[in-house]
Image (spheres, grey):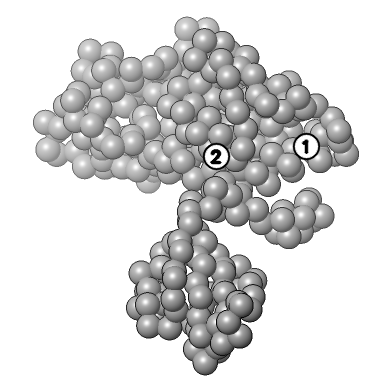
Amino acid sequence: MGKISFAIPKGHLTEGAFRLLERAGYTILGADRSYRPSINDPKIDLKILRPQEIPMLVADGLHDIGITGVDWIRETHADVEVLLNLEYGKVKLVLAVPKSWDDVNDLSTLLEKFARENRVLRISTEYLNISAEYLMNNPAYKRLYGDREPLMVTPWWRKGENDRVVLYLSFGATEAKPPEEADAIIDVMETGESLERNNLKPIDVIMESSAILIANKISLKDPEKREKIYDVLTLLKGAIDARKKLHIFVNVHKCNLPYLLEKLPALKKPTIAPLSDEDWYSVNTVIDRSQFLELLPILRRLAQGLVVYEPRQVLPLEEISQNEERS
């Protein structure tokens, strides 16, 4: 079986990535002191990298799979295969301005305010491409500046024709840039606390993002690497799905069994086994966690000896196999 290189994101996505991997059955050692932590699978090499870099590095084949954010896929336009939404690291990319600007409540009013006052609008962001697309799709921007691309400024190059709206590349701490280095920012927001501490208010949500598992398209065509990539995918999806499930065991009298089976959901069909007393059966199944409180009155009336487990993993083997065959 082929060995694969797995890129793990550094920063706010790191903890969730390692927690998910450990729930999936992997043991990670040395992540707190090395960019190359060890994993209890000799067919996987781990490397910790910034999430901004991972899409392009995976697209170029320097790593076979990686975890990054939806936002960085969109920002880099990386040509990768998105395998799975990992359902953590949920953030919103927002446009934010000083809270004292009562007359600015969306991008259009921000653009119109600066055009009316004949001022250059300075926006600090790590997301130059997303920000430029966002601005140019705004009706007020089109009316004021036509199809001219906003000026994008980095330490190495400048791009764009519209020097009345300038996007400055930020290398972090973006929320601290106003008012000296920027008038507004475009940045990710998780709880809004950081914006609040810096006297900023979000006035528009540009997109929502979360952590995703991506793969190099050529690696997926290699039979051995593909096999290992789908092993990782299966275990991670199993760990994610397990958080939404409960495994329940009940004993039920045979006269109540048909009604219980009618009401009881299952991944496929409940497992039913006779007990030593021929009038009783054991039933076990996996249900959605959200259904448990609704089912509890039925179980309490019809069953005896209810046992509830939180599964570590629920492996969707048939679903993964079907997806692998289609891809």
Q: Tell me the distance, in whole angstroms, between the alpha carbons under discs 1 and 2.
A: 18 Å
For the question of whether residue 274 can be seen, the reply is: yes
> In which quarter of the view is residue 322 placed?
bottom right
Reply above or below: 286 against 191: below
- Mark 2: which amino acid? Arg
Question: In the figure, is residue 217 to the left or right of 160?
Answer: right
- How crowded is the residue under tag 2: few (<14 C-alpha within 10 Å), some, or many (20+)? some
Rendering coords of residue 259 (x, y %): 50, 89
Residue closer to the observer: 274 or 33: 274
Q: What element does badge 1 sit on?
A: helix
Question: Which of the 4 quarters of the picture holds residue 3?
Answer: top right
In this view, the residue farthest toward the bottom is: 255
Q: Is residue 27 above or below residue 90?
A: above
Residue 288 % position (x, y): 48, 64
Question: Does label 1 or label 2 sit earlier along the sequence?
Answer: 2
Query: Residue at (58%, 35%) from the top-left corner?
Result: 21
| CB atoms of marks 1 and 2 within 8 Å | no
- The image shows residue 183 at horizontal and vertical percentages of 25, 23
Name the residue nearer the viewer: 320 or 139.
Answer: 320
Please indicate whether residue 109 sits to the left or right of residue 136 in the image.
Answer: left
- Residue 238 x, y percent position in the rendering: 61, 49
| Residue bearing the label numbered 1 | 228
- Amino acid at circle 1: Lys
The answer to whether residue 73 is above or below residue 260 is above
